[in-house]
Amino acid sequence: MTEIIGGVLGAFGLSASAGLNAYIPLLVVSLLAKFTSLIELSEPWSALESWWVIGVLAVLGVVEFIADKVPAVDEVNDAIQTFIRPVAGAILFATSAKTITDVNPVLSMICGLLVAGSVHAAKSLVARPVVEASTVGIGVPVVSTLEDILATVISVLSVVLPILMIILVFLLIWLVAAFFNRRKRAREKVIESEI
């Protein structure tokens, strides 16, 4: 039973991570499947263990890493990634949920698509514009680097310790909500003082 729960939590974590960066969790899964027994990919997902796929993911990961650090270029990257990140989340959810449970692949892919798409939308439509506007673009590389670190940590924890990963994700959601709530209250106080 704990393996099933861990598999489902891991699937959610990996697809959420894909919403931040499509290639990091795919590369983590590919490398862990290739070199460890932590993940066993069934067909057709075992193609992720191919050296060609690993190489392509590494190159695409480097391209996204660089593009996401440059103000204005990151917006173009996010527009392109609007199609890629949800698909990566769907693949990751299907690969990890299928290794532990008999969840229907279509349902798995829909769940992954929705999770990664939601995280991507929150990142690109809410968080990033606030960072760019409030820091005049200077904060973009810092936030992008933090997102990459977070995507890596969540991806690894999703496979190794999925329970800890879900606690981390809920903690991060709470911190982000508290931050935006504080900013909203501060703006309301400024508006009240001007009236």
Image: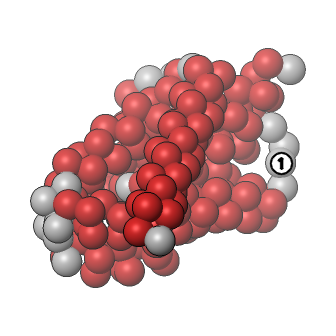
Residue placed at 54% from the left, 41% from the top?
178
Quadrant location of the N terminus? top right
User: Which residue does the numbered mark 1 point to in the structure image?
Assistant: 103
Q: Between 65 and 38, which is closer to the camera in this rendering?
A: 65
Residue placed at 29% from the left, 42% from the top?
146
* Residue 195: x %, y % from top left: 47, 71
Q: Is residue 172 left or right of residue 20?
A: right
* Residue 24: x %, y % from top left: 36, 48
Q: Is residue 178 above or below residue 195?
A: above
Q: How is the rendered protein coloured?
A: secondary structure
Label tally: 1
Q: Is residue 52 left or right of residue 13?
A: left
Q: Between 170 and 180, which is closer to the camera in this rendering?
A: 180
Q: Is residue 64 left or right of residue 17?
A: left
Q: Between 194 and 72, which is closer to the camera in this rendering?
A: 194
Q: Amino acid type of disc 1?
A: Val
Residue 32 in view: no
Q: Is residue 195 above or below residue 44?
A: below
Quarter of the image holding residue 173? top right
Residue 115 in view: yes
Q: Between 41 and 104, which is closer to the camera in this rendering?
A: 104
Residue placed at 40% from the left, 43% from the top?
151
Quarter of the image holding residue 4? top right
Q: Is residue 173 left or right of residue 57?
A: right
Circle 1 sits in a helix, a strand or a loop, which is it?
A: loop
Mark 1 surroundings: few (<14), some (14-19) or many (≥20) residues within 10 A: some
* Residue 133: x %, y % from top left: 27, 69
